Structures are given as structure tokens and as C-alpha cells.
Image (cartoon, rainbow, N blue to C red):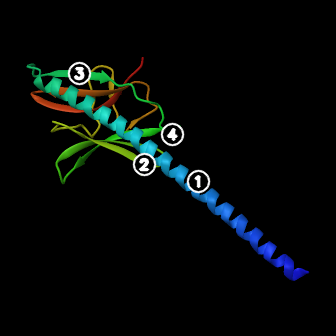
Amino acid sequence: MPQAAMPHVYLTIAMIAIAFIGVYSMSLVVNYVNVKCEEAELNVIASDLSARLSRVYMIANLTPSNEVFIYEEVKLPKEVNQKPYEITLEYNEENGLWYVVAYLSVRNLTQGKAPVANLTRLQVTPVDLPGNVIFALPLKSNIGKPVVWAWKKEGETTAGLGYLEVS
């Protein structure tokens, strides 16, 4: 009698193992799809900020005045897939381009990146800005009113990220 029951035990263990492998495989697929969706959304955010940063930089740079400060308020989602994120500016030495990089605060390997066109100077060190704009790098997604800004001072134009100080 015990010899007849052994194949049933082996088959039951094999079926349970196959079920666990299936569940584990599905969780890997779901996690992969979530990461790809987060990367896509971060790429959209980085591309949008890149275009806006380039635009305010060009406007300030083409202004005939020697000194001008402009900013544009940016509507950003507070979270990506219910996770906070941060935005920073990086310079690539190989190709000489600036990039807007958006990455998840909890998993900074998941990121979106977009080159900033027509820019020669971006502000990556803290600076006191005119008006009620506060310099911020990295720019956190949960900050109230994020902005992109450009400052032409003595003929030299600089751009960066920040937020509006609410009084």
C-alpha cells in the first residue's frame, strides 16, 4: 500500500512546485511591466521639463536687456505609480549636453532622461534668485509649485529648477 501512495505524493509536490513557479513568474512579469511604465512616465516628465527649460532659456537669452529674470510654473504629478520622485540636472562630458533626469526617490535606478537643447549654462549649485523663486536641485515632486527659470545677468544667461515660495 505505501508504494502506491508514493507517486501521488511526488506528483502533489511537483504540482505545488509548478504552482509556486507560476506565481513567482507572474510576479516578475508584473514587476517588470510596472518598472517600464514608471520609466515611461519619468521620461515624459523629463522631456516636458527639458522643453520648458530650453524655452525660458532662449527667451531670456534673446531679450535685448542685459538683465532679466523669468520663470514658468510647471504642473507636475506628485507621484509616479504612488511613489515620490526627484528631478535633477546632469552634464554629460562625452557629448557635451545637459540632461534633465527624473528618478524615483525610493529606487533611483528607475529613471527618465531627456537632453536639454540649446543650453550652455545650467545652474547646479545653490544661488539666491530674485523674487519669490527658490533654487532647488534636486527638485522633489512633493514641493508646492515647481518652476523652471532663466536669469540673464550682465549678458550671461543661466537656467535651472526651483519652486515658488508661498507666503
What element does badge 4 sit on?
loop
Bin the neighbour count of mark 1 within 10 Å (Cα to Cα): few under 14, some 14-19, many 20 and up: few
Identify residue type, mark 3: Ile
For discs 1 and 2, the disc positioned in front in the rendered view: 1
Residues at marks 2 and 3, CA–CA distance in whole angstroms: 31 Å
- In percent of the image, x 17 and y 23: which residue is there? 59
Point out residue 70 in the picture as x, y percentages from the top left corner. 23, 21
Q: Nearer the viewer, residue 29 or 134?
A: 29
Q: Is residue 40 above or below residue 21?
A: above
Q: According to the image, label 1 marks what residue?
A: 27
Cα–Cα span, label 1 and label 3: 47 Å
Viewer-closest of 24 and 12: 12
Q: Is residue 42 left or right of residue 97?
A: right
Measure the alpha-carbon separation of dots 3 and 4. 31 Å
Of tags 3 and 4, which is closer to the observer?
Answer: 4
The residue beneath circle 3 is 70
Q: Which disc, if any, is residue 110?
A: 2
Q: For residue 99, what is the image quadrant?
A: top left
Residue at (80, 73) in percent of width and height? 9
Give the amino acid at mark 4: Lys
Q: Which mark is residue 83?
A: 4
Which quarter of the image is occupied by the C terminus? Answer: top left
Q: CA distance from mark 4 to mark 1?
A: 19 Å
Q: Whole-percent x and y of residue 25?
A: 58, 58
Most extreme residue toward the right is: 1
Q: In the rendered structure, which amino acid carries the disc numbered 1?
A: Ser
* 115 and 126: which is toward the camera: 115
Q: Earlier in the sequence, mark 1 or mark 2?
A: 1
Label count reads 4
